[in-house]
Amino acid sequence: MLILLSQDRPTLTMSMKSTRQRLVALRHIVGTSTPTTVLRSYLNGDPLKGLSKSQNALFKDAVLVTVYRKWLAFPPNSLLDIGITTFDRRKLDEGVDKYAGAHAENFFRHVWFLHLRIRERAHLPQGDADPDRFHFGSTVFTTQEEARGLLHDVWHQPVDEENAGLGNRPIIYISFGNNDGYATMRRDLDFDLSSANTTIAVMNAQSIAHQANITRSQDASIDYLLKPFKITPHDPANSGNAAAYITIIVFLSVLRMDLYHQIVENPKGKPGRYGQSKSKPARHVINALMLRPTPAPPFGHQTYCSACGSCEHIRPSCDDVFVACMRCARSKQSWRRENAESHLEELCAFP
């Protein structure tokens, strides 16, 4: 716990006020620039035009966060799981490889991937998504409160961990299509990511790809947006994988001229084995990324049985072979009746 001496408080208060003022200024100036301009400056560690020296220092401290959520397809459309990625450019500056590398592989090494499943709703159907097939890191079963707490922590990272009085780092929030719009309407977590005081920009990955001339469409799917890079997605309906692929789309789109440009052979920066990316295909970079372990957060459970509620085994290993929720079996809703054998009655998400 940080204990402040009385003479220190005014200084820290002024520091926090100064950071808040710079966040407001950042939000305004970033809002007048195109997302591709902002992200290319941020990813390459370059100053953003229009910002003062101190504002650019704070801009360089920003954290890039992608969030993708999955909801139940039936009323009450409860939140089922969340895919999250974070990129901290400050970690890149502390390392050896400060340049993007082939297909941005050096940048991707500093992306943290996470898939959170809301434990009390883990038995609910997800349509075409397979929540068990997350390929980029750890799936963690959490309570909704734990998920909310993690998002709050991601959005409130101190500029200096040893001096909390300096305020929090800016967040550049990447969404996809109307996924953030659904979140605003449903408010499952009572935490609006778009309007948090640390959020300096909300950017739609579909619009970014369009601005970067990857596609003419402004509402293209994840699969479609990966095709120019010759990347075939695996289980993109899984929210964790979706967040990962959205991040990949954003990086490769924004950095296309840095990654693929060659003066004679490829002056327009067409994605492929050109420029600093000529040594390998993009799919090799993504395959290596999926094999790289990402540490799980220090809460929740990586093992959970959605049928009986045990944290010692997973559903296929459950001894309770004959599971049935009579509450769902008697429901007037056909999808609940069809899902009745997925869980014990005491685990039912509905009254």
Image: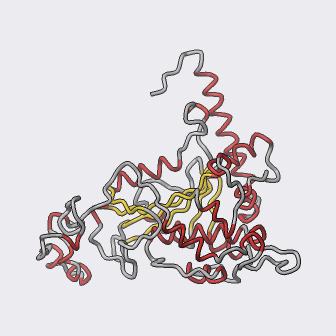
Count of picture labels: 0
> Relative to 138, is 54 above or below?
above
Q: Nearer the viewer, residue 8 or 229?
A: 229
The N terminus lies in quadrant: top left
> In the rendering, at what x and y percent does residue 293 appear?
46, 60
The C terminus lies in quadrant: bottom left
The residue located at (73%, 75%) in the rendering is 278
The residue located at (59%, 77%) in the rendering is 283
> In the rendering, at what x and y percent does residue 338 appear?
22, 83
> In the rendering, at what x and y percent does residue 321 appear?
13, 75
Left or right placement of residue 50 versus residue 193 in this view: right
**Looking at the image, what colour scheme do you see?**
secondary structure
The residue located at (72%, 52%) in the rendering is 28
Left or right placement of residue 326 versus residue 69 in this view: left
> Relative to 178, is 158 above or below?
above
Rendering quarter of residue 58: top right
Left or right placement of residue 179 versus residue 322 in this view: right
| Residue at the extreme right of the image, as rendered | 264
> In the rendering, at what x and y percent does residue 39 appear?
70, 60
> Relative to 332, is 67 above or below?
above
Rendering quarter of residue 69: bottom left
Q: Nearer the viewer, residue 237 or 275?
A: 275
The residue located at (59%, 15%) in the rendering is 7
